[in-house]
Image (tube, rainbow, N blue to C red):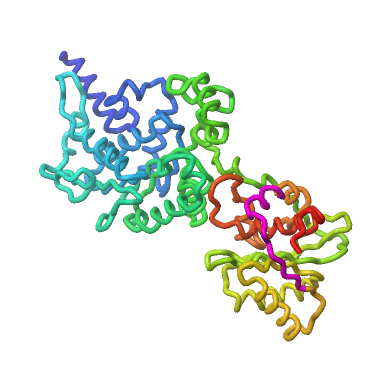
Amino acid sequence: MTDLEVIKHMAKLELARREFFYFCHLLAPKFYKENRQYLIDMCDEMQDFYYSDDEVAIINVPPRHGKSRTASMFAQWVFGQNQEEKIMTGSYNETLSTTFSKAVRNGISEEKADQDQIVYRDIFPSTRIKQGDAAMNLWSLEGGYNNYLATSPTGTATGFGASLLIIDDLIKNSLEAFNEMVLEKHWEWFTNTMLSRLEEGGKIIIIMTRWASKDLAGKALEHFTDEGKRVRHINLKALQDDGTMLCEEVLSRRSYESKIRAMGPEIAAANYQQEPIDVKGRLYISFKTYDGELPQFKEIKNYTDTADSGEDYLCSINYGVTFSNEAYVLDVLYTKDGMEITEPKQAKMLYEGEVNWADIESNNGGRGYARSVERILRDKHHSNKTRIEPFHQSKNKTARIISNATWVMDHIYFPADWRFKWPEYYKAMTEYQREGKNKHDDAPDATTGIAEKIGQGSLFSFD
């Protein structure tokens, strides 16, 4: 090379050391093109996050736009900045976590195929994999100890401390996105395993396609924001608000529309537009609310769904019935407490709410529960105002909930601040899915009971 060519070559290497995007561009120019602005922006955000005081970065990127590749490149670049970093990465299974580890390790170890090829060692010559460190998912740099660990919810992280956590796409498919229990397990793994490995002052990067409002990205955004941590959210949509694509070369408008037709609008919106699938899949789209003076009621009623098992909630709702058969929710008892606690609580709620009639499902011990509540009303509160009516519920729960959803949305009114008055009940109602496996259905079940008792007349009578 001429002196000028040498100067240009060295300038490229120095720029790659300093700038994460140009590191990617130098090693993989066919993908990290300088005209792909979204990649420049994403890389710049990740670099700025690394040097900033921010503690958590949530990066939502559509499929095939380079999120996993960029995450593995970032791990390599970070090791070039600081060989004392300890990076732990997490993927949804051991196969993917091993693939991620190989990408990082092989990138650092790559040998030149010809003299003109630029490899990692040209940019960061002092960053090398420790010789003899053969484990694929746990390895060290020369002069370091256990610098990198790749794991998954089925793997282990015992004995490893991390200064940087990188979580890459935990959700496998739409079936997992619909399964609240799978999402809960992801969160438990993240908090119990991954966070316990994070060292003081460490940083977290979660890079994934959005699927559900309670996926890891959604829960992390809510949790860390509530904790007061400095959270950075990078949200990239395939189809921009102005109708252009994020990158026409990576995903054209024609291909995007073809994918939408093939996979359906809800899954496409989650995958490509970062709109959680369960937001579109929620059974209840909206709720009516009231504030201020209540209307005149012809009676005050109660509907109670007793807990079928220790994992279920008891849900008891006091509501006023107007002369036009609209229901106004007045009080809610929603709890996993045992009967020794819920029986006196409900008796008190019925007494103080001046309830005229209480319908209590008699399935699975409900009849005995109803008798106990009636006894407490009589003995402790000296009241016989409330008529307790136990009844057997024989219809399919899910079918009842879905078939009455429209009436619930149109004719049941909730206090304007019900989100704060009864947060768990509010959460159970607003997150219930039309399809898929719901972790709890006790709140929609009891609320549906109101619709059946006053909204549908004798058609849905269970007495």
Measured as percent of width and height from the top left, residue 308 is found at: 58, 66
Measured along the vertical axis of the image, is residue 278 above or below residue 197? above
Residue 29 horizontal side relative to residue 344, left or right: left
In front: 219, or 119?
A: 219
Measured as percent of width and height from the top left, residue 254 is found at: 52, 19
* Residue in the picture at 51% in, 49% down: 214
Q: Count of labels shown?
A: 0
* Residue in the picture at 46% in, 23% down: 251
Measured along the vertical axis of the image, is residue 400 above or below residue 253? below
Residue 421 horizontal side relative to residue 275, left or right: right
Measured along the vertical axis of the image, is residue 220 above or below residue 259? below
The quadrant where residue 447 appears: bottom right
Q: Quadrant of the C terminus?
A: bottom right
In front: 176, or 365?
A: 365
Residue extending farthest to the bottom is: 379
* Residue in the picture at 18% in, 18% down: 116
Q: Can residue 413 be seen from the camera position used here?
A: no
Q: Is residue 446 magenta?
A: no
In front: 245, or 102?
A: 102
Residue 436 horizontal side relative to residue 152, left or right: right
Measured as percent of width and height from the top left, residue 369 is found at: 66, 75
Q: Can residue 183 be seen from the camera position used here?
A: yes
Tell me where the magenta segment starts and ends, as one range: 388-404
Residue 386 horizontal side relative to residue 130, left or right: right
Q: Quadrant of the N terminus?
A: top left
* Residue in the picture at 87% in, 54% down: 324
The quadrant where residue 19 appears: top left
Measured along the vertical axis of the image, is residue 25 above or below residue 370? above
Measured as percent of width and height from the top left, residue 457 is found at: 82, 55
In front: 212, or 290?
A: 212
